[in-house]
Amino acid sequence: TQTGKKKKKNTLTPLLDVTFTGAFGNFLVGLMKLDRVTVPEESDVDPAIAPCQNPKFGDYQCNNAMGLWSKVKGKGTQFKGHYEESPASEMVDSCSIAGPGFVNVVLSRPWIAKSIQKMLVDGIETWAPKLPVKRAVVDFSSPNIAKEMHVGHLRSTIIGDTLARMLEFSNVEVLRRNHVGDWGTQFGMLIEYLFEKFPSGEVANDQAIGDLEAFYKASKQRFDSDPVFKERAQRAVVSLQAGDEKYRKAWSQICEISRKGYEKVYQRLGVHLEEKGESFYNPYIPGALELLSNQGLIEESEGARVIFIEGKNIPLIVVKRDGGYNYASTDLTALWYRLNEEKAEWIIYVTDVGQRSTLRCSLLLEANELFGMFFQAAKRAGWLPAEDNKYPRASHVGFGLVLGEDGKRFRTRSTETVKLVDLLDEAKNRCKAALIERGKATEWTEEELEKTAEAVGYGAVKYADLKNNRTTNYTFSFDQMLNDKGNTAVYLLYAHARICSIIRRSGKDIEELKKTGTLDLVHPDERTLGLHLLQFAEIVEEACTNLFPNLLCEYLYNLSEDFTRFYTNCQVVGSAEETSRLLLCEATAVVMRKCFHLLGITPVYKI
Ligand code: ARG
């Protein structure tokens, strides 16, 4: 607000941010189109806009009008008349000023209704956010060959897939990278152990070393207890890296067995990934290091070649004392490759925030720190801009631990490590049992039962993970995640199925209604639901730019709550407003389905 000396009338400050999509973005663009405000393009105005905490004041509020005004005044900004005197725009019902610098906006009900109907006709894709990037790499899942794929990798797979889906929805081309650990020194010992167990030279088939984890453990034991074996294993690494055919063959055999194991998990989760493991970058390492070296970034330190990072006591080792490469050399090279060869503008790493194992990385560092160091080095090299919010950009999406109900690191009863396939199967089986208990075995075909149990079971595992702020630890509990009440996928999927059944029971052709009917939001609960639907675009944009899938979960849960309130207080089938209300049901179902889709959850249509 501008409070002039004469205290004439409050005036709406020009707010302009064309990158802001969603209802308020439209509102601002609308104001511009109406020619109410003009703002010089170069002024850096960032309106702090948020939904009103208390709906009593309005739908949206701007909290920094004063600050904005001081930024733009005297810089060619002009008002075309006072806002309150102008005829209301189609989008805005009313605007009020609450205290100095706060502007509350109430959107117009017909405009909300019209926007929803337009989405129903043109498709939810029209509500996709617009991001300033064309291509992104999402580096996720990324287990280590022959070692277990643990719940941490499951979290990475679930979170990474959702982020990829949100970016894809936003028309970003996503390279879904499985950066598998397929090139560490552990291969020397694995290959040597393989040769020892199968001396005929005939490389074992899958069955012979079927349990790779046990195989890994046994070879590790051998490595730790027998110095002669250890030496052979170290030589084996050299032979492998030099490309010796016999060693390469054994290596690829081991990788292949691991791969088959992961595939089972990915297939159940419906997650698609493209493997480009650490080995892929190996041939590029010398070139990438030379670039860094030419820029004077690499120094000699105690026989190793390192990069010093400002503010860190330990440098990033890129060539070990023995001349070998490590995790850091590979990751720096992968970053170079992704930026320069793959031309990605945003590179997103989804790994836990915790400590990395000593075997994988010679430095005992928190993953956060380690990635921070790569990014720092890349900035010094000029590969990335100095500012974190500029593109090309690298982001580390860290997440917390999975805990068991005992509050300790999650483990299953039988083995030390969690067998992920068994875990997913258990979720599904429990769902199936619950469906049978509800009498669905007689009502449905076996296939329907299976498909629904899968959708609900796997969906429950994903949602239980995604709904938490990813940086916190989360407790894995079947009982909680499979509860059909509360904030669970089961509850949400059933809520969606119920909406579908309302529409079915009406006997109306919803496609026809979309074209001929009119959506209207008469009851206050209809308006609340409508406004919430409209906010979908803003939420996806926020979840996507800040890489927080839990925002979308929260949105989805609130949506279903708003729907319940509407459905409790407004009669749909058989009422005078039937057509309009059926359209509102349909819009809710469409938005819910898109949320499910973005969260990697398969919707169910009947229950
Ligand atoms: N393989 C690593 C692990 O299991 C994760 C790799 C993450 N990606 C990366 N580019 N460093 O902890």
Image: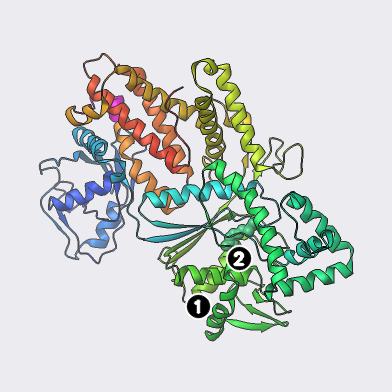
Residue 24: image x %, image y %? 27, 46
Give me the residue at 58% from left, 25% from top.
432
Q: Are marks 2 and 1 in contact (CB under 8 Å)?
A: no
Quadrant housing residue 389: bottom left
Name the residue carrying label 1: 381
Residue 156, compared with residue 573, is above or below; it is: below
Q: Secondary structure under badge 2?
A: helix
Residue 384: image x %, image y %? 46, 71
Q: Magenta stretch: give its range.
A: 519-528
Give me the residue at 52% from left, 36% from top.
459
Quadrant housing residue 178: bottom right
Q: Which numbered disc, 2 or 1, marks the residue that appears first in the sequence?
A: 2
Residue 247, compared with residue 125, is above or below; it is: below
- Tell me the number on the disc at residue 278: 2
**Any part of residue 365 in sight:** yes
Residue sitting nearer the eye, 151 or 280 = 280
Inspect the image, locate mark 2, and give the three-letter code of the amino acid beneath it.
Answer: Glu
C-alpha distance separating marks 2 and 1: 22 Å
Inspect the image, locate mark 1, and give the three-letter code of the amino acid beneath it.
Answer: Ala
Quadrant housing residue 57: top left
Give me the residue at 53% from left, 71% from top.
376
